[in-house]
Image (cartoon, helix red, strand yellow):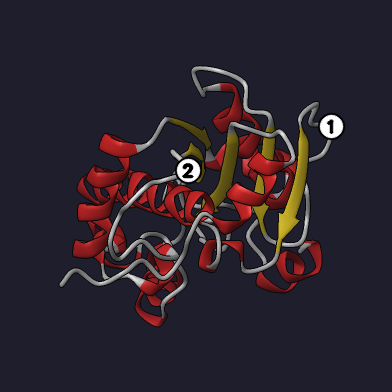
Amino acid sequence: MARQSAVNTAIEYQLRIQGYIQVAGVDEAGRGSMAGPVVAAAVILPINIDIPHLNDSKQLKPQKRNVLFDEINKKATAIGIGIVCHKLIDKHNILQATFMAMKKALERLPFKPNYVIVDGNRTIPDLTIKQQAIVGGDGQSASIAAASIIAKVTRDRIMDNMHNRYPQYDFLSNKGYGTAAHQEVIFTQGLSPIHRKSFQIKKQLKLF
């Protein structure tokens, strides 16, 4: 018997009852990374979607994320992806860059959703669509969980490509996050062209 998903469409269903038929779940990947872009995804799912094992991307192993990435692409009503590079992160700060990526993801949907649900405790500024933020939404809502997987796998593949350019930083393993080995390479060799020069963990925590 196939294992049931850890998430469901109960939130989306309640919004549908209120008249919001096309509900987009939004999440990001790469916010806490020291290098590379921040990536956001917006996903609209059919209300009766059945994707076994669907869950918050952080709770899944890479192989399972890749399988679910393909499954979501097959079954989703619509998917949009927004990517904001390290240069814009340095220019605007990671919080604003994350919102930029989320807006891009929504803009790249083939049609405008009626309602947006965002993982976390902040809504997207200046959005003309009704929205709500849901803390831990990627562990509750199927569409947010799907967005977390699309964003994570998309970004991981970008960082895998960056590994080919800058193999000494081992982006294939760390995806740009601040592991001890990654920080040691930065200490001995300096930053790569795709490192975020503005990255400061204490400052980032204050933003969120």
Farthest front residue in view: 17
Query: What mark, if any, has residue 126 been given in the picture?
Result: 1
Residue highlighted by disc 2: 47
54 relative to 183 in the view: left or right: left
Q: Is residue 27 left or right of residue 163?
A: right
Q: Secondary structure at mark 2?
A: loop
Estimate how packed mark 1 is, as few (under 14), some (14 to 19) or many (20 or more) residues with alpha carbons within 10 Å. Answer: few
Residue 129 visible in the displayed image? yes
Q: Amino acid at mark 1?
A: Asp
Question: In which quadrant of the rendered view does residue 55 lie?
Answer: bottom left
Within 10 Å of disc 2 (Cα), the crowding (few <14, some 14-19, many 20+) is some
Could you say which quadrant of the image residue 96 lies in?
top right
Task: Give the quadrant of the N terminus.
Answer: bottom left
Which comes sooner in the sequence, label 1 or label 2?
A: 2
Residue type marked 2? Ile
Instruction: Please identify the quadrant where the C terminus is shown.
Output: bottom right
Tell which residue pokes out farthest to the top in this image.
110
Q: Residue at x 43, y 51 (%)?
A: 146
* Percent of width and height locating residue 121: 76, 62
Residue 50, position in %: x, y? Answer: 32, 52
* Residue toward you, 167 or 101: 101
Instruction: Give how far apart the Cα atoms at labels 1 and 2 are.
Output: 27 Å
Q: Residue at x 56, y 50 (%)?
A: 27
Q: Which sits in the foreground, 31 or 28?
A: 28
Q: Position of residue 23 (x, y in %)?
A: 60, 38
